Image (cartoon, rainbow, N blue to C red):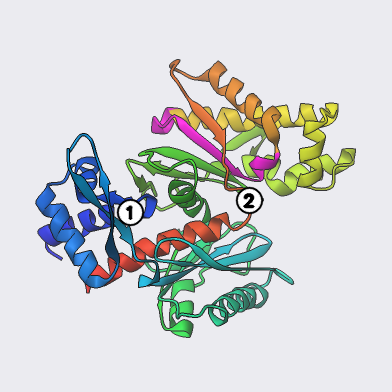
Amino acid sequence: MNAISSVGLRNSLRIFETLMVKNASRVEIANELDLTKTTVGEITKNFIDLGFIREKEKTHDSRIGKPQTLLEIVPDAFHVAGIGILRKQVEGCIVDADGKILRRKSKYYKSFDYNSIINSIFEVTDDLIAGNRDKIDAIAFGAPGTLDSKNGIILKPAKFLEFENVPLAKIFSDRYKVNAWIENDADVAAIAEKYYGKGKNLNSFISIHMEEGIGSGIILNGEIHHGEYGYAGEMGHFLVKDNGTFKYLEDLYGADAILERTRMFGIPDFESLKKAEKNKDKKVIEFLQEIGEEVGAVIVSMIHLTGISTIFLGGKATYLGNTFLNSVRSTIKKYLFYDHEVKVELSTLGDAFVVALGASAHGRVKYVEKVLKK
């Protein structure tokens, strides 16, 4: 594509992404994205011709003085499957073009060898497709570890020793005859926060996803920040000193490590941990404060590195309650280089299907991009 076409593509995607968050008029889009009315008019006409968006009702804006026609995404324009490859299970969903969840499915792995994992992903995908009244147009994955997103390859996921160098996008594209893309699991969790959670209308924020691994998705100026090799935000691999030895943060405070500790004082799972925190169990309170201090210390470093001061804590962090959250906040306040406002909140998305939902949102954008490039 030439430079002008590239600019047109980027502006088109920005407009579609705006409509993924909210219905808006052409004037609102032009003002929000700092585009000319002519540019917005041409791009939205193209989207209407493609059947991707349509005009809705008129709304009155007192600043403009006359009713404006709202634009919305056409739900049935296309369907996308989002698949979250987690450490212990696979979760999947199908969404329409406007992001409504049409179907969900999950399955735990029977074992952690290659065949068990890939067959579980096939089973979930097959079930989603079989139960959807319309065909799917694309599949997008959220997967842990280091990826080659451009070529759709899972390179080296932590704790998936037999799932390295897997050309996942090609495998699924060949099997289902649709386009397929992959993205890091923490990055798509941030994308889910951007379109479905507290990150709506925010230009920059960090989404921390605490599961067996601890990852973070960095939204910088509206875009996922990948870094040179695609693994920017691997918060779980920050080094923490434990009894004189450097260890990874996620090996000490990932979901499995947390439960290993809590089982020592009779707390078997995260629901029980949540109740114990509410009941002010002394051992639980002390442990959650410890987690908050260590996670908060790493967040301080991330704030200093990125300059981003809005943080959302998701995944299993949502079970750790205000004790954990307040410990994170107080640690940040204590060690922040420059005293300025920092917003740290628990995500409202919970821990189920977040990666799948974020993957589906990523797939919606990638599918639109693919169509526009034809």
N-terminal of the pair, mark 1 or mark 2, is 1
Q: Residue at x 49, y 72 (%)?
A: 168
Number of dots carrying numbers:
2
* Amino acid at dot 2: Asp
* Amino acid at dot 1: Leu
Q: Is residue 149 visible?
A: no
**x and y percentages locating residue 191 in the rendered image:** 45, 51
Q: Residue at x 78, y 32 (%)?
A: 278
**x and y percentages locating residue 269 in the rendered image:** 80, 48
Q: Where does the magenta region start and end?
A: 304-319
| Apparent side of residue 364 relative to residue 163 in the rendered image (left or right) | left
Quadrant containing the C terminus in the rendered view: bottom left
Q: Tag 2, which secondary structure?
A: loop
The label nearer to you, 1 versus 2, is: 1
Q: Residue at x 48, y 60 (%)?
A: 359
Q: CA distance from mark 1 to mark 2?
A: 26 Å
| Apparent side of residue 330 relative to residue 262 in the rendered image (left or right) | left
| Residue that mark 1 sits on | 19
| Apparent side of residue 23 relative to residue 241 in the rendered image (left or right) | left
Q: Is residue 119 above or below residue 341?
A: below
Q: Residues within 10 Å of mark 1 (few under 14, many from 20)?
A: some
**x and y percentages locating residue 203 in the rendered image:** 35, 39
**x and y percentages locating residue 284 in the rendered image:** 80, 32
Q: Tag 1, which secondary structure?
A: helix
| The magenta stretch spans residue 294 | no
Quadrant containing the N terminus in the rendered view: bottom left
Q: Which mark is residue 351?
A: 2
Q: Which mark is residue 292?
A: none
